[in-house]
């Protein structure tokens, strides 16, 4: 994730494992789906986008920033990457990231967030029991 001052927005990419998404969707609907079927079916793809957006929340000065899905890319290695952008916002104040994405389905997994600022990486690890953290970077 990175803040782009010219666009006045945060942009992020979230990498998920396609077979995890197919498993969750299949279990939820009681029908076996491939990731290709999910991505080609508007209702399933929109459901997946909502799952992604609900599992990734950024607040600035205690105010939530709203993100939208700009696109996705299915990699040959089975990774599914979602590209997100926030609403326009000036960058000021304290950032808090909540990142429980998929932890209710896979409670032992870790989510990692990499915040890039001025070429420096600030990596945070999130667990099901510790899914919200302040990003230790000043504006």
Image: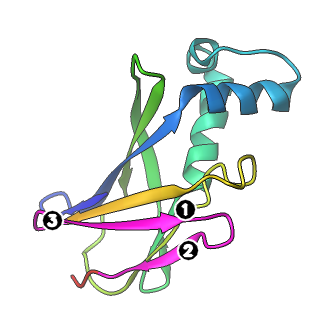
Q: State the residue at coordinates (55%, 62%).
A: 99
**Is the C-beta separation of discs 3 and 2 under 8 Å?**
no
**Badge 1 is on which residue?**
99
**Badge 3 is on which residue?**
5
Comes first in the chain, label 2 or label 1: 1
**Is the C-beta separation of discs 2 and 1 under 8 Å?**
yes
Q: Position of residue 135 (x, y in %)?
A: 37, 77
Is residue 131 found inside the magenta-colored segment of the image? yes
Comes first in the chain, label 3 or label 2: 3
Q: In the image, is 26 to the left or to the right of 124?
A: right
**Res. 112 image quadrant:** bottom left
Looking at the rendered image, the disc whose residue lies closer to the viewer, 3 or 1, is 1
**Badge 2 is on which residue?**
132
Would residue 2 be seen by someone viewing this image from the given angle? Answer: yes
Q: Is disc 1 placed on a helix, strand or loop?
A: loop
Comes first in the chain, label 3 or label 1: 3
**Res. 7 image quadrant:** bottom left
Taking depth in this image into account, of 49 and 27 the one nearest to the observer is 27
Distance between the alpha carbons at the discs numbered 3 and 2 = 25 Å
Q: Is disc 2 placed on a helix, strand or loop?
A: strand
Q: Position of residue 63 (x, y in %)?
A: 48, 79
Q: State the residue at coordinates (72%, 55%).
A: 107
Q: State the residue at coordinates (72%, 15%).
A: 33
């Amino acid at each position: 994730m990175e803040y782009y001052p010219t666009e006045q927005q945060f942009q992020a990419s979230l990498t998920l494992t396609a077979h995890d998404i197919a498993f969750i969707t299949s279990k939820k609907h009681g029908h076996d789906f491939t990731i290709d079927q999910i991505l080609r079916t508007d209702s399933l793809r929109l459901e997946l986008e909502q799952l992604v957006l609900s599992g990734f929340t950024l607040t600035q000065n205690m105010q939530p920033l709203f993100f939208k899905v700009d696109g996705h890319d299915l990699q040959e290695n089975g990774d599914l990457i979602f590209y997100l952008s926030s609403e326009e916002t000036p960058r000021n104040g304290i950032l808090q990231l909540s990142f429980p994405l998929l932890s209710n389905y896979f409670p032992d997994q870790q989510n990692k967030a990499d915040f890039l600022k001025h070429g420096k990486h600030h990596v945070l690890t999130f667990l099901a029991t510790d899914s919200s953290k302040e990003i230790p970077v000043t504006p």
